[in-house]
Structures are given as structure tokens and as C-alpha cells.
Amino acid sequence: MFKMTRKTVICFMILCLMPLITPAEGEVKKHPSPFPKRDFAREQLLHEKDSLAENMPALELAETVSRSFYNSLGATRETSTVDIPLSEWTSNTTPDFEEPRFSRNTLGQLEMRPNLSVPHNTYGFWSSPEFTVLKPDQYNNDNSVTIYVEFSYTGVPLGYRMPSLRARYNRSDFLDAGLYLYDGENMDPNGGTGEITCKLDTNLLTQDASYFVSVDFIAFDAPIDPDFTLTITKVYLMGVYKTAPPDFIIDGVWVETDEDAKAWINGYKVTLLSWCYDAAYNDRMAAMIYIYNESRNQYDVYVWSDDVLTWLNADDTYQVAVAGNYVAYLEQDGDVKVWNPATDELTRIKTDGFRISSGGDEALMIWDLDNDLYIWLPQEGLYKVDEDDIWFLCDTSSVPVALY
């Protein structure tokens, strides 16, 4: 997401797409088709991909992890961070105040101390190199860049006042700015560490813009201990982006006694598929197993997404799950495959699956024939959880996973 140029300009790139916004009263949502569209040429290509996947090796194991470590995987998937190198910062003063004593310690961290001659009239600041924030593609309440400043400070003798610390950001053309003041009265007279933040609302941008960060040292209240040291230990940026919402929002999927798969989509009740054996869904897609022969032993996968019904897999499906932007299906021979309707990417993950389930966000949980638990995440890869005592899986959606 970020790139540092030779001129020390940090390009901070954020992918932001419009969030789901509740329609205003009287606004009409899109009506899903009573007979979803089909793309037969696409289905033929998918069947060919599915066949080719049979000869693909299963994914290599990224790592064996603990369950607690798994909980942290993907925790920052919707964020991107970048450090602002302290080596590129510059010290600055103004003529109306006494200059702080600027220095860098052996770790390259930025230090400021009161002026020796007039410590109670000290003001100055360190400034970062410029970084560029890209305008979001679409409005989103969560679009933002947050600036984090970590610092430490020394204690002062009894009766001395603590200087204050202020973090601020400015657009290079000074049409946008923000700040946060950490008052010295909130500092521990025995010394300590802290962190302050400033949040930049990127929705205000009409075009890409350059920014810089400054950290001020403010010592105006006598008496000030001239040996007090404020150290900037780390400064970094965190940008947040969200996935674009679909035009059609699924609020529920169920299979009725006549084996029709029904759904609430944008507030309308629709039939997705007849002769449905099992189904799984999230807010944007539904995966269904279709039984089409008298012996009831041939199971196809159909996927409803964005008002299109796609025949994905033929004959041998055992179980389906939906994980974020992916549909997963377990075949009767133990193959576990995933498909992304947006990109048509189709991958075989494992060859010895026993049960599958969504695991929150885009995570897929796989229980194999050795009673081991595996976690697949599209960006991080396939992980094996170090415990091997799996008895059954629980699905995060409202569709239960059958227990056998």
C-alpha cells in the first residue's frame, strides 16, 4: 500500500470503496430477478477449471500455529500501515521562542530538551517528510488515515512543571490540518511512555494530496527542568478501507419442505434453486447443493451472486461453505476447492477434507480425515492448528453445519 521514493516522499495508498448505506425512506432497492441470469459460456470455463484443479497439488502448509495465533490472523486485513522513518525528519524553530536542544539518540530516535538559557520559553518541533494520501474511490464513513506518535519522557524533580507535547498534521497547501495536544499535566513526574493519535478524514479529499506530520515541544510554564528529555520513539500511519457492498444484500437463505431454496434479498423473497439439498450464505452470495437424479446421489454446486446463478461443480459435491468473497465446496473424494465469483479464481486447497465451515471474515475452516483442523485465508495461506482433537465444526453464519 505504501512506497518510499528517493526524495523521501511516502506514497500512502488506500483502497476505499463505498460502504453499505441504509437507503433513505422511500428509496427503492434493486429487485432480484425471479429467474436469475445464467452465463453458460462462463459455466463451461468453470467446469474446465474445476477439472484442471483435480491435477493441481494441494496448497503447501504455511505454518502450524496455535488457536490463539489463528485469532490474530487477518485482524488487520482492512488496515495498512507504514512507518515514517525518523532518519528523514528535520528540526524546526520559530523566531519568537527559544530553540529546544534537538538531538538523536543512539537508536536514531528524536529528542528535544528545554533551552538552557530560557527553559520556560522553549518551543520547536520535528517535521516528517511529506507523504501522499490518495483520494478514496468512493465515500465510506470508515475512510481515514490515523497518525500514531509513540514517545517516552524523563521524570522531573519535585516542584518542576512538565512540558507539553503536540502532534499535528498539515496538508502541504495548508487547506487541511489537525492536531492533538498531550498536556504536560497528564505526564507522570517520574517519567514514562505514551502514544497520541490524530485522524485524517480522507473523505474530504477531492484529489490526491501531500501531507506532513510535526511533533511540537512546548515549555512555557516555569519552573522547567532543563534536563527534561522528550523522545519520539516511533511514528507511523494506519489507513483503513472497506470492501464495496454488493447491489444485492442477502438477509437469509432457507430450504423449504418442497426442497426449494428461498432467500430474502433486498427485502424481497425469491426462489434461488429447486431440489436443493443444503445451502450456505453470507450477505452477498449463496452456495447451494442441487440433487438432480432419482437415486439422489449426484450433487451439483450452484452459486447465486449479484443476481446471477452459476453452475459451478457437477456430480460429486459433499458440502458447501461461504467465506467472505469465496465459495468453498468439499467433494466426495475429499478435495476442498474455493472459487471467487468476482475473479473466477478457482483453487484446490486440500485433498483429504472431511468437513468445512466458514470461520469468520474470509477464513475457511477444514476438518480433515486425521481430525486435524486447518485454517485457510486467501492472503495468508493454509495453516494447521496445532491441536488435533476436532469433534465438529461450528459455522459463523445462520446456516448450521450438519454433525455426523
Image (cartoon, rainbow, N blue to C red):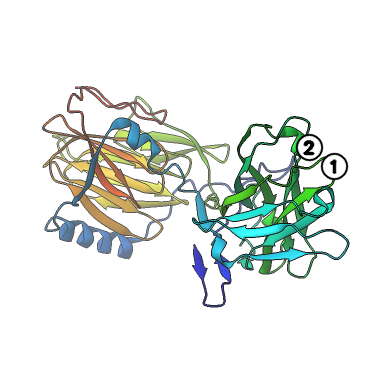
- C-beta proximity under 8 Å, tags 1 and 2: yes
User: Hey, what amino acid is under mark 1?
Assistant: Asp
Q: Is residue 219 above or below residue 279?
A: below
Query: Circle 2 is placed at which residue position?
Result: 161
The residue positioned 41% from the left and 31% from the top of the image is 397
Question: Which labelled disc corresponds to residue 221?
Answer: 1
Of residue 194 and residue 222, the one placed in the foreground of this image is 222
Question: Which quarter of the figure has residue 268?
Answer: top right
- For the residues labelled 1 and 2, the Cα–Cα distance comes to 6 Å
SS of the residue at dot 2? loop
Q: Is residue 19 left or right of residue 386?
A: right
SS of the residue at dot 1? loop
Looking at the image, is mark 1 or mark 2 earlier in the sequence?
2
The quadrant the C terminus occupies is top left
Residue 353, given in percent of the width and then of the height, sits at 16, 38
Q: How many marks?
A: 2
Of residue 31 and residue 382, the one placed in the foreground of this image is 382
Which residue lies most toward the bottom here?
Answer: 6
Q: Badge 1: few (under 14), some or many (20 or more) residues near its Cα, within 10 Å?
A: some
The residue positioned 62% from the left and 67% from the top of the image is 129
Question: Which quarter of the figure has residue 285?
Answer: top left
Q: Is residue 152 above or below residue 6?
A: above
Which residue lies most toward the right here?
Answer: 96
> Would residue 332 be seen by someone viewing this image from the given angle?
yes
Of residue 199 and residue 205, the one placed in the foreground of this image is 199
The residue positioned 42% from the left and 28% from the top of the image is 398
User: Hey, what amino acid is under mark 2?
Assistant: Arg
Residue 168, given in percent of the width and then of the height, sits at 73, 54
Q: Is residue 278 left or right of residue 197?
A: left
Of residue 299 and residue 216, the one placed in the foreground of this image is 216
